[in-house]
Amino acid sequence: MASGYLHGYSEEMLFDLVERLDVRGPRYTSYPTAPVWSTDFPAERYPEALGKVGRDGRPVAVYMHLPYCRQRCFYCGCHSFISNDREKMCSYADSLKREISHVGEHLPTGARHAWLHLGGGTPTHLPDEELAGVLDHLESVLPGIQGGERSVEVDPRVTTDEALTLLADRGFRRISIGLQDLDPDVQNAVNREFSYEQIRDFTGRCRGIGFTSVNIDLIYGLPLQTRETWKRTLERVEGLRPDR
């Protein structure tokens, strides 16, 4: 929520909007959404489609999924795995690089990407050298255009300055910080705990390292949330001046 967004909107207007949008639906993070997927899809269609990517000269968007997390957040519905097994995460990185190479075999010459997003899981839970290796391999197979947009989702509890620096060095300027709520009781209920001071300091370090667009993720409807606790979270987050 951008700084100043709450000004001009009464509390009743905001909660009226929340109530009107409080309906069940498929996850919106992929399109088409999962309910319309089908197994009736001939295998040969996939390389045929890859062969058309970027053929008209337009750059493409790439999403890369890194599924490992240090611990489970109880609200999470993402395709993720809880592991601190370095060998397992390195093996996944190797498999991902092989998949990038396989996809690259079918891409037309000169294909480029303009958008790259790392999601998960927690992309920065991957060992730094493995994350760097995957990103550099992608760049060698499907290069990015000059000034392209690169973004990453992070858990500030596991994201080191070294990880932030290697991402910034590779052109990442947008970062999405998973906060969800600042109330200690809510945080304890969903197993995602850290203080306002930690999120404030982490946000500052992101900007200092070179991230120019800082997003803070929030979730309403978590256990133990009330109007008052949610309002306090919004007010404190607004003070951090998130860009989104």
Image (cartoon, rainbow, N blue to C red):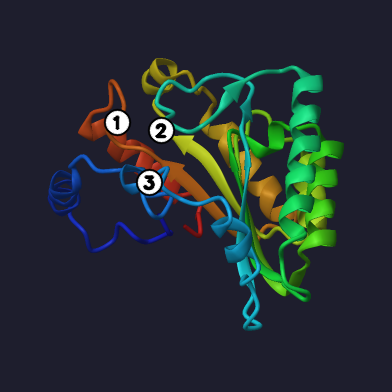
Q: Is residue 101 left or right of residue 123?
A: right
Q: Is residue 79 above or below residue 154?
A: above
Q: Which residue is mark 3?
A: 37
SS for callout 3: loop
CA gap between label 1 and label 2 equals 9 Å
Where is residue 110 shown, x and y percent of the image? Answer: 77, 76
CA gap between label 3 and label 1 equals 39 Å
**Which amino acid lies under the numbered mark 1 shown in the image of this protein?**
Thr
Decide: few, some or many residues near mark 1? Use Cα within 10 Å; few <14, some 14-19, many ≥20: some
Decide: few, some or many residues near mark 3? Use Cα within 10 Å; few <14, some 14-19, many ≥20: few
> CB atoms at circles 3 and 1 under 8 Å apart?
no
> CB atoms at circles 1 and 2 under 8 Å apart?
yes
SS for callout 2: loop
| Residue appearing at x 66%, y 83% in the figure | 57
**Which amino acid lies under the numbered mark 2 shown in the image of this protein?**
Asp
Q: Earlier in the sequence, mark 1 or mark 2?
A: 2
| Residue appearing at x 37%, y 43% in the figure | 34
Decide: few, some or many residues near mark 2? Use Cα within 10 Å; few <14, some 14-19, many ≥20: many
Where is residue 70 shown, x and y percent of the image? Answer: 64, 21
Q: Is residue 145 above or below residue 91?
A: below
Q: Which residue is mark 1?
A: 229
Which mark identifies residue 142? none
Which of the two discs, 1 and 2, sits closer to the camera? 2
Q: Which residue is mark 2?
A: 181
Nearer the observer, 198 or 121: 121
Where is residue 171 shown, x and y percent of the image? Answer: 75, 62
Nearer the observer, 20 or 199: 20
Asked whether residue 49 appears in the rendered view, the answer is yes
Q: Is residue 152 above or below residue 110?
A: above
